Image (tube, grey):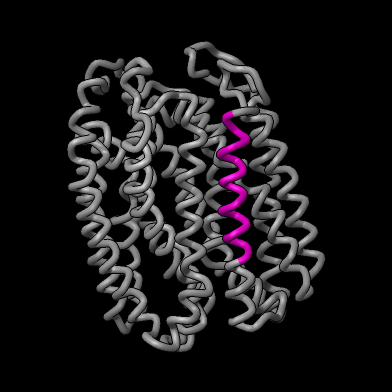
Amino acid sequence: MPDHAHYLQGRLAMRVVLVFGGAYFLSYAFRAINAVIAPALMADLQLSNADLGLLSSAYFVGFASLQLPLGVWLDKYGPRRTEAALLVFAALGAAIFATSNTLAGLWAGRALIGVGVSACLMAPYKAYRSWYAPERQSQLASWMLVLGTAGALATTVPVAELMPVIGWRGVFWLMSALIVIATVTLFFRLRDVERERMQFTVTPSSTPDALSYKAIFTHPYFRRMALLGSVHQGGFMAVQTLWAGPWMTQVLGLSITQASRVLFAFNLSLMLSYLLLSWWAPRHVSYGSQRGWPALRVVGIGISLSILLQLTMLLLPYAWAWLLWLPFALLVTVSTLAQTHVSLSFPSAQAGRVNSAYNLSLFIGAFSVQWGLGLLIDVFVAKGWDNSTAIRLAWCVYVLAQGFALFRFVTSKALVITPTGTAATQ
């Protein structure tokens, strides 16, 4: 690894964050937009809940399918070229989505969007792991999630206001144009930075073969973290980007306008929570080599409290209960510390593979929860339950899955490979 004199600092460091962050802003907007346009899609195309869940999960299918080759490309070609090339497919997918009149066409467009934005978080994580000091990693990860949540924020009230003017098709044409702008900016604005940094970066060929994908996926520590991440962090993606909307309208009885405002408040709280985490974590959270709260202990406590809060939400299906989503936004952010812990636990030259392998587990979880909730809702409706009760019953199944994943995480004896290269349990 390079010494501290070679790490990015000052304006150049901030430029890299903002350029990568702009693309991630748009990728998260794509991820979350169906929560707002879902009623219009269902009305225009006569979609069922399962159809809607399948359509929205197409993003995660496309995203997940690229994660393993993406890790190799990031390590081999670098984050700038890899992400810029893939973003072209996102722009094309948005255009296909905007022009399609069938579920199959919409699914293909959304899957292509998932393929195109698949590097929007892994590419900056790869760059940060190699170009910035280790103690900055959790802060940088939180900043990216702040920018991503801002993208989700932009799909609430702003999109709801645009819908009557340009429709959901017009919204996707606009997104396609913005992706093209982000692609050009990333490719040219980071070219010189990446070339300069490459001379200080260790290449994967100089590292042992023990960190192949097979070694990563079979490592007990990685399996422990991947299960937790897929159910909790991945599942939260599914909730935030789709099922939060139907919960507000069908369980709490809010109008579409009221729901968009609540989702705006929720995503704003989430963004502020990530900002708080970016300040608190570098000062108080330990990743094995410094003093502070062990990162995995913080993760376990935060997830435990979020499960208890979700149980409370299930028992209180009243309009005012949207307020419970604000502390929920604060608690779920701690799961991102697990992702930083995984990234720091392996050599930086393998960061592309490690981050992509972990991210694959998150998006498998997101796909499973997003589609699975839709299937369960339709099953419960077919059994005679009303839509509100069916959503709550489906969510109850998801909470049970979260409890199981947390139990396996807490009781696991898998060794943690710390950034210093020593083994420990947490």
Q: Does 79 appear above or below 38? A: above
Who's the residue at 72% across and 54% down the image?
327
Q: Is residue 126 visible?
A: no
Pick whichever, 20 or 311, lies toward us. 20
Who's the residue at 69% across and 41% down the image?
302
- Corner quadrant of residue 127: top left
* Residue 69 x, y percent position in the rendering: 27, 41
Quarter holding the N terminus?
A: top left
Who's the residue at 81% across and 68% down the image?
316
* Residue 136 x, y percent position in the rendering: 47, 29
Question: Magenta residues?
Answer: 265-282
Who's the residue at 60% across and 41% down the image?
277
Q: Does 6 appear above or below 91? A: above
Q: Is residue 278 left or right of residue 189?
A: right
- Corner quadrant of residue 176: bottom left
Q: Is residue 267 magenta?
A: yes
Q: Is residue 199 visible?
A: yes
Q: Looking at this view, name the residue that lies furthest to the front.
A: 11
Q: Looking at this view, name the residue that lies furthest to the top.
A: 422
* Residue 377 x, y percent position in the rendering: 62, 71
Quarter holding the C terminus?
A: top right
Q: Is residue 6 left or right of residue 280?
A: left
